[in-house]
Amino acid sequence: GIDSIKEMGTLARQYGTNFLVISGSRTLRKSVVLDSICEKLTENKVKYYIHEIAAREPQLEDVDTVVQLALEHQCDGIISIGGGSAIDIGKAVSGLVTNGGRIIDYLEGVGTGKTIQKDTLPFIAVPTTAGTGSEVTKNAVICSSKEGFKKSIRSEKLIPDVALIDPRLSVSLPPKQTAYSGLDALTQLIEGYVTKKANPITDALAVYGLKKASRSLERAYKDGEDIKAREDMALASLMSGLVLANAGLGAVHGIAASLGANCGIGHGLACAVLLPSVIEYNSKKLPDKYAHIGCLIAGAYTMKEQQAVQYLLNWLNDLYITLNIPRRLSDLGVTKEKIEVIAQGSKGSSMSGNPVDMTEEDVKAILNELL
């Protein structure tokens, strides 16, 4: 809720007295947000150490470095303030401090199979963007640009103890980041609604989030101080996290992970570029749920399936024009020579939830069409 950040001190004091604060943005240090949080911690006799992370998707070395800082300062809790990267690093650090080892040991598909067995350090997640929903999920996504992968450490124990969501914290987010993070949330809501693992409860959450995002993303982009739009997007992001945690995702996220790892494309932007093409591919075989989304956004429930799917695609096209979203992968530095490695890296857990089975050749075809 608005101004809920004022509760930080009393909330933190319930979990510890010595916190490592992971700050995900230099603008936070310049703004009064970080100062006010620290003031609340001090008022409640909570010691803290601030560590500012690099503005990039979290790398292996980022996590291992912060783990050592938490151990050196003998921290008994972690607070992450920032976007998905800051929160994912905080999750991973909270687990590794108590369980030992390096982050690579725990990553699915590339690690040694080590798992989180012991209770983690108390962890408070404070998102300053409205996009990933990472504050309510059990996995942290970590990259290796050197080795070209983007994988998860996953455990129920990694779910944050507190998700403190204050829409005011996103007011200073620039328009471009508002668009990219918002489109990540929108993609997660759409993919979570159509995934093979969807159920009536996740469907209800997805519909709620889609109503919020479809009416407020453009408004938040045009006027960052529109607090109602910011509140809607914070709720949409939260719903998207709850949906993906319980229903999974699909091909957009499967391919986007590989684009991020192999081409350095930001996650929200990668999702945005891929989303219309994946909708077109999936809806040819399973149009019904995409049609439901089209009707929801149009506010008209008498359209035929293909008409409603086309409405959704047209709406996305108009939204992308307004938000200045690139439409071609070549505009983002992707070349034809990279298609093979991107497709090979698109086989993560998200792909298993795609409503339509997709082969590596199908992925290549989508990527080639987007060049």
Image (cartoon, grey):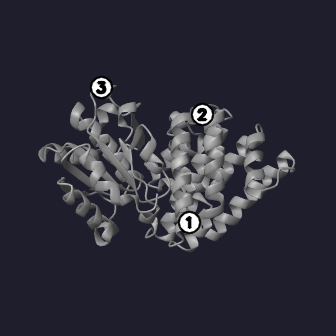
Q: Which residue lies at the image location 53% right of the left edge and 50% below the top edge? A: 337
Q: Which mark is residue 353?
A: 2
Q: Which residue lies at the image location 34% right of the left edge and 25% below the top edge? A: 113
Real-space Cα distance between discs 2 and 3? 27 Å
The amino acid type, in three-letter code, at marker 1 is Lys
Q: Nearer the viewer, residue 319 or 110?
A: 319
Mark 3 nearby-residue class (10 Å; few <14, some 14–19, many ≥20): few
Secondary structure of residue under mark 3 = loop
Coordinates of residue 296 in the picture (x, y in percent): 74, 52
Total tally of numbered discs in the picture: 3
Q: Which mark is residue 228?
A: 1
Tell whether label 1 touches label 2 (CB within 8 Å): no
The amino acid type, in three-letter code, at marker 3 is Gln
Q: Which residue is mark 3?
A: 117
Say whether disc 2 or disc 1 marks the residue closer to the N-terminus. Answer: 1
Mark 1 nearby-residue class (10 Å; few <14, some 14–19, many ≥20): some
272 sits left or right of 310 in the view: left
Real-space Cα distance between discs 2 and 1? 33 Å
Of badges 3 and 1, the one in the foreground is 1
Visible residue check, residue 364: no
Real-space Cα distance between discs 3 and 1? 41 Å
Of badges 2 and 1, the one in the foreground is 1
